[in-house]
Amino acid sequence: MLKKILYILWIIILGFLVIFGLKNGNYKTFISSMENRSFDIRQEYISSAGLRPHNDNIVIVAIDDASYEYILEKYGEWPLDRAVYAKLTDYIEAQSPKSIAFDLMFVKSVKSSENSDNSLVDIFKKYDNVYTAMNLDNQDADLRKPAVLPEKLAVNLLNNSKKIDTKYYEFTNCRSIIDGILNSTKNIGMINVLRGDDGVLRQMPLFLNYNGKYYPQLALKVALNSLGLKDKKDFEITKNGELILGDKKIPVNKDGSVTLNWYGATETYEHISLYKLLKAIEGDNSYKFDFKDKIVYFGATVSSLSDIKTVPVDKVYPGVEVQVTYVNNLLDNNLIKKTTPAANILITLILVILTVAIVLALDSMPVIIGLTVTLYFAHIIMSYYMMIHHNLWVEIVSPIAFTILAFIITVIIKYLIKSRDFDKQYKLATTDGLTELYNHRYFQEQMQMHCANAKRYESVFSLIILDIDFFKKFNDNFGHQSGDAVLRQVAFVLKKNVRATDIVCRYGGEEMSIILPNAKKDEAISIAQKLCDIVASQKFKLSNNRESNVTISLGVSTYGQTDGTEPSKIIESADKRLYHAKETGRNRVN
């Protein structure tokens, strides 16, 4: 019965803790942050081991420290003259690249160099594979009037999934780029990024909502160009939470973002310093580049330009490398898909059931711990391989946390039951079933122990051996049930009227014994006489509602030279005095 109660209690506690975990914000935040860290560790290992090769056809023209210094010396100012970007684009386009993308925002017209802006605008009119960036924000309207963006930049998004909120990234303002570019091309994408609560960038939006319309990310537009979907205007998210891009199905998170797979630390992709390209267009033939069929991204990698992020695989990661990673993910359909809450619950239940089974089936705690730790490591390794081979983010922290909790509760309950069973078995081994007094075996053990203690500490103890007078008549005249009733009642009277430290045992048959720790002979005799008087003064119930007087005779011995210092001598001495009490009239102490 106790086992059932404890197991029901275990289920209630575990269920309560699961519900508490799901509803408690601090717990969820802690688990979420730990899970994100486990994702980062897996990504770090996969990328450092070279298990996920990047796309070699993506090249970054980097505004690095050397280029920034060269620009300041050569041109005398930053930002770089826009006419120079126009020349750079013409130079690259001569080699037939797949696309050119500027992870740079050309905001505000340069009044002192209007022709420079026009040169750049002409580039966007001239080439249909050149892309540039914009950014949405929530600045107050009294600081910057929200711009009305051209209709051609917006897309249509059909969301068939009830679990995905495509309006999660909704903005009220934007940092618009120069009108000439806005009006001359639709190859403009947003470059808003997402950082987790810990400041690490793991996810990116697909579409952003502004004035009730959807605007795609720059990386998405560049990827669509390479996939032959450049003019795609209508997008659909399926019931299963996947964005359809041709024959690709892109897993979408519930907030409308995607989780990136990371190919390596900074400079994983081919980097070309901008100053080398500038020298090339200035006529320096020592620099040769191959841009044929390449995706060329312009972006800042110098930290002083403040476009630095922290990502799972590197603490210092330029924004332009985030963009090319995003493009690479879309082209290879390498984006991470998270397991559903139902799948996480199922995994947790399996781990919990296996853990509980191990704890209940085995007795050796080292073996139990070894097997459960092996089980947890197996889950971690499985999640690692699922990320490598299936781009699947299987949760580690929450399932193992609940499994460890189940382990602790199961161990506690198991050992509570085991302790109770041990106590029960010990009681059965040391207790007389009829009288519920300690049995003869226990009596002998206690005599050995008390003699040893008395010898070691020079203390004293006494022993009473008693016998129920004329006990045979109860069995003969009233039946064995009456005899048993008398034994039980006498035993109860003895236990009730001795000291808490005294040990009452059934010695054998109708004989009983009492070990009196720290009791000298006079005190022992006094206790024996008290017990004798109490028994004699009561009526004892027999079978068939009969009653009878009962008396006992008692013999007392004490550890020492007179009665002996060995258990057998002390018992023999008390036994002799008991028989003397019976021979001299019974119902007395000797």
Image (cartoon, rainbow, N blue to C red):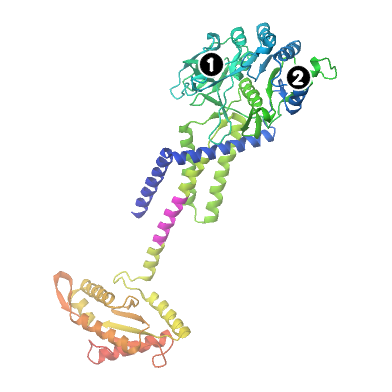
Q: Which residue is mark 1?
A: 215
Q: Position of residue 131 (x, y in %)?
A: 64, 14
Residue 231 against residue 370 in the figure, above or below: above
The residue stretch that appears in magenta: 408-421
Q: Indicate the quadrant where residue 266 lies.
A: top right
- Residue pictured at 39% horizontal, 64% vertical: 423
CB under 8 Å between discs 2 and 1: no
Residue 509 against residue 124 in the figure, above or below: below
Q: Indicate the quadrant where residue 284 lies.
A: top right
Question: Considering depth in this image, is 481 or 188 the residue closer to the camera?
Answer: 188
Q: Amino acid at mark 1?
A: Tyr
Q: Is residue 370 left or right of residue 85?
A: left
Q: Is residue 413 magenta?
A: yes
Q: Is residue 356 visible?
A: no
Quarter that holds the N terminus:
bottom left
Q: Is residue 277 magenta?
A: no
- Residue pictured at 55% horizontal, 40% vertical: 379
- Residue pictured at 57% horizontal, 23% vertical: 192
> Mark 2 and mark 1: span between their CA atoms?
35 Å
Q: Which residue is mark 2?
A: 75
Q: Secondary structure at mark 1?
A: strand
Q: Secondary structure at mark 2?
A: helix
In the displayed image of the protein, which residue is found farthest to the front? 112
Q: Report the predominant secondary structure element of the magenta stretch.
A: helix
Q: Is residue 115 left or right of residue 535?
A: right
